[in-house]
Amino acid sequence: MVQFTSPQNRALNSFDAGERPSSAGLRPVLHRVTPMDYERIYERYQELQRYVGWTDEDAARVASVAGLAEPFFLPLVEDFYEEIERHPAARQVIKSPEQLARLKATLVNWLRELFSGRYDREYVTRRWRVGWRHVEIGLDQVFTNVALSRLRRGLMRILAENWNRDIPFLLEVRQSLNSLIDLDLAIIEDAYQTEHLERQARSARLATIGQVAGGIAHELRNPLNTLKTSAYFLRHVKSASPEKVGEHLERIERQVAIADRVITTLTEFARQPLPTLSPAPLVECVQEALGVNPAPGNIRVHVDCPADLPRVMVDRAQLSIVLANLIRNAYDAMPEGGELKITGSAADAAVELIVADTGIGIPPENILRIMDPLFSTKTRGIGLGLAITRAILDKHGATVRVRSEPGQGTTFTVSFVRAPQ
Amino acid sequence: MSTRHPSVLVVDDEIDICNNLSDILTAFGYDVETATNGFAALDLVQRRPFDVALLDLKMPGMDGLTLYRKLKKLRAGTVAMLVTAYAGGDTTREAIDAGAWQVLPKPVDVGRLLGEVERVVGQPTLLVVDDDADLCENLWQILRQKDFRVCLAHSHDEATRKLQENPYRIILLDLKLPGGNGVGLMETIRESNPEAKIVVITGHRSELEETIDRVLSEGAEGVCYKPFDVNRLLEMIQHAAEQNRT
Ligand code: HEM
């Protein structure tokens, strides 16, 4: 079966409280259907028409029996609703006799359109809206399936019992009508699918928010913990020496800076402005980054870049974020100490920077996920460092590769665009 | 009774928090040591007992709960409070199941923390000397519920060592121990913990009859025969605790 919907296109659509109030009143907020949706739906409909081999002749054949079928629409509709009466779960979506009367009229109309012979964009849009209406009222899809199959059987019986032309033509008409009903069923299914995908996307978004919130909670509560305990000390320990008081004030400042960095990281990730590229000496940038992120005492740092290394096209401010992340990750990977080796080399149109540590390494099952936002195996941090790194490098037209051997170390290779001579 | 200050071990990978809690607890009269990871903490614990341990739950290398489980094996009598940025949920339940006294949310409410520490150090200490690890764990759980701080010793030597480290109000003593006789410990107890009340626990009613008579005549509070009637044992312990208080 060809799928009507593609999740990629839908994931980020907006929502509102529903243009039409839901008659069931209990439905969750539904997706607002936009003209773009109708465009997509019609394209899919045409694709399906091709798939089932639908032609104008099919349309003409169905239209040619409209007059024969029309007198039987009303009994068919009566039968349709009698069947619904027998299913409590289906019946409860119909609230009043007036509504039932209206529904019967709309269903007759629906059948008339089915035989109209015009299956254009407007037809598909109208049919999809009907399907969507059933989604909105919270009707289980099973019922529309069963109901349509009952209508189909009814129509086939009517044709057979009242046929007054040759049998081969009856068979052709039946085939065309079956295809048409299949296509209509696919439209209704698409409406249900749309809602299903929306719901999935919504819960995925909620899960992401939960994950981010968890990360932020941890990252902020630690500095808050120090702030709060220092405040307690300053307020309650009257005998504190001026040195002690000074120590606590310093701690407060330091932890405020830590909390601030959490927020900076988040906004950096959320914003990610386009880089302003200009030629820059890579070695100098590396030295700068090492200056801002000095190595712990048990880690040796070794920078090996030829003096004539070509300049690279970068946004220096953003590059400093990238380098800081790679360097700090390397430090974090070597809690017992080790060596960080940063090597620069010129390739054809690129300049490669290799950042290698002799740390704990990354297990194979994690290697594909390390650049995903919010993925982290550390006890500190939200898990955005490498995600930011990759996003920035993407916008630089630079690439990043990683190789890792658990217990041996990890090597990141960044390939920058070489500045023109 | 010893007049030493009650001791607190603070473990948090955030050095600032270690220092802050140390400053505060010291100002309130506690004897405080800090460690910034589980391994350093276990080193300290090997060397000396603590009345209370404040453990950060999420730490690199060894998380607070793992640390507590190891600590409890070494020092069952140390009462642990875990501190976490996400209180509630599975970890909290797991920590309580493992025997932690409290799980406190971050940022810590220092007033509450001090209250809890004060309450814990006021709980009577009790030493169970028995080589049956399962029995010890059961007694630990039951007596912890009754607000006793329960230390455990599984051998004659361990008991001797623990008797020197801490004053105990009550001692539950199994007469048959690996590496020595429970009776021999009576002497040590009388020297190191002259005020302690001793309850003998034994599974050997007939063979040890003479020995039991002897320990009773030497001042043991009573005897509980295994398998014991837990209510009866608790009554004896409560009674001993009250006697001892006056
Ligand atoms: C595939 C078979 C079905 C078709 C072709 C069909 C057709 C229609 C049509 C044309 C409408 C009017 C939509 C609008 O313009 O708002 C509608 C609405 C509705 N249908 Fe169906 N329907 C089908 C199955 C069912 C079933 C099984 C039930 C179960 C009770 C049902 C209950 C309703 C209700 C409650 C409404 C909304 C009425 C309102 O807006 O007041 N339908 N249907």
Image (cartoon, coloured by chain):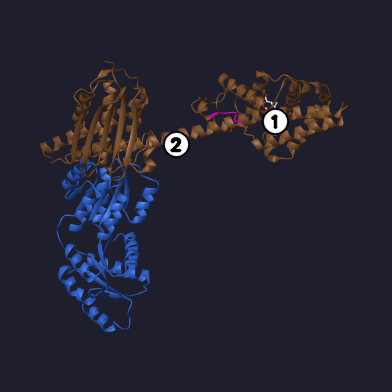
Choose mark 1 or mark 2, whichever is in front.
1
Please give left or right for residue B140 compared with residue A26 in the image.
left
Q: How many marks?
A: 2
Magenta residues span A2-6
Residue under the point 21% across and 32% down = A293
Q: Quadrant of ligand 1?
A: top right
Identify the residue position indicated by label 2 in the image.
A207
**Residue B124 percent coordinates (x, y):** 25, 61
Given residues A206 and A190, the one toward you in this image is A190
Residue A182 image label: 1
Point out the residue furthest to the left here.
Answer: A242
Which chain comes out brown in the rendered image?
A: A
Given residues A120 and A52, the one toward you in this image is A52
**Residue A271 visible in image:** yes
Residue under the point 26% across and 30% down = A324
Chain B image colour: blue
Point out the residue furthest to the right here.
Answer: A164
